[in-house]
Image (cartoon, rainbow, N blue to C red):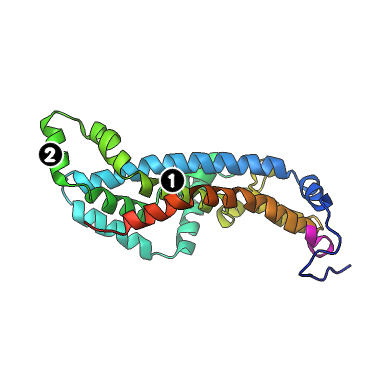
Amino acid sequence: REYVPKFYATSPTFSNYVDAFTAVPLAKYLLNTLLFTVATTAIMLVVITLAAFAFARLDFKGKDTVFTLFLALMMIPQELVVITNFVTITKLDLRNTFTGLILPSVTSVFYIYLLKENFEQVGDDLYKASKVDGTSDLRYLTRVLIPICKPTMITIVILKVIECWNSFVWPRLITDKQEYYLVSNGIQQIRENGFGRENIPAMMAAVVIISLPLIILFLAFRDRIMEGVATGGTKG
């Protein structure tokens, strides 16, 4: 039986949302996605913050060369990165594990670059004064730089959360057990289980359920996002 899309609902019902949760373990997939998103975002934030601080404030041999090579990585097609990541994770025997899901996503050259530029907007005089007072680099980072650059960091966190929540290709490649499926895999599984053309409304209900947390997140932090983008894009 075919369903013809209509602009207006002729007989609204919530049964499709029930179908979305009963056809597949969608609640389990939502929990998996939440754990994956929180863990990946938290680890990535630590990694990019330390890397951005090193490039912005520390002096070490070959810093400019290393940073240039980092930027060059942005020109590599993501398809090539997925292939190499898949081979590496498979050789490490990390398929069908949360570690295998998380590891390839714990860093981002673009976010390192964005945060480095933001850190460099804070004057060198403040850093030199803190060193005169005997402040360690880690204390200066946590007590001075991070509070000043909080809008940009919040923006990065929100963008990363959206990226992780919508992740599809990598979880699809690296997991073939239901216990590690994410919500994006759940949508595909609904179609494979026979919903597809026979129950499009249930698939759309699942899409609404999956999209709702991101919509709420954006509405709650839209001012912070705009502030972070404006701060990150202003030099001097």
Tell me which residue sits at (43%, 65%) in the image. 77
Q: Look at the magenta stretch and give its main secondary structure.
A: helix
Q: Vertically, is 119 above or below 35?
A: below
Q: Is residue 211 left or right of residue 131?
A: right
Quarter occupied by residue 192: bottom right
Q: Quadrant of the N terminus?
A: bottom right
Q: Tag 2: Cα neighbours inside 10 Å, few (<14), some, or many (≥20)?
A: few
Residue at the limit of the structure toward the front, as seen here:
223
Mark 1: amino acid: Val
Q: Observer-nearest residue: 151 or 108? A: 151
Q: Is residue 18 left or right of residue 126?
A: right
Q: Is residue 131 left or right of residue 56?
A: left
Which circle, 1 or 2, is nearer the viewer?
A: 2
How far, Cα to Cα, is label 1 from label 2? 31 Å
Q: Quadrant of the C terminus?
A: bottom left
Tell me which residue sits at (28%, 33%) in the image. 143
Q: Is residue 33 left or right of residue 109?
A: right
Q: What residue did someone put label 2 on?
A: 128
Magenta stretch?
196-201
Q: Earlier in the sequence, mark 1 or mark 2?
A: 1
Q: Where's residue 63, x and y in %?
A: 20, 51
Q: Where's residue 221, x and y in %?
A: 49, 48
Q: Observer-nearest residue: 162 or 188? A: 162
Asked whether residue 97 appears in the rendered view, the answer is no
Q: Where's residue 27, x and y in %?
A: 70, 41
Tell me which residue sits at (69%, 44%) in the image. 178
Mark 2: amino acid: Lys
Residue at the limit of the structure toward the top, as seen here:
134
Q: What residue did someone put label 1 on?
A: 106
Q: Is residue 90 magenta?
A: no
Callout count: 2
Q: Where's residue 14, x and y in %?
A: 81, 51
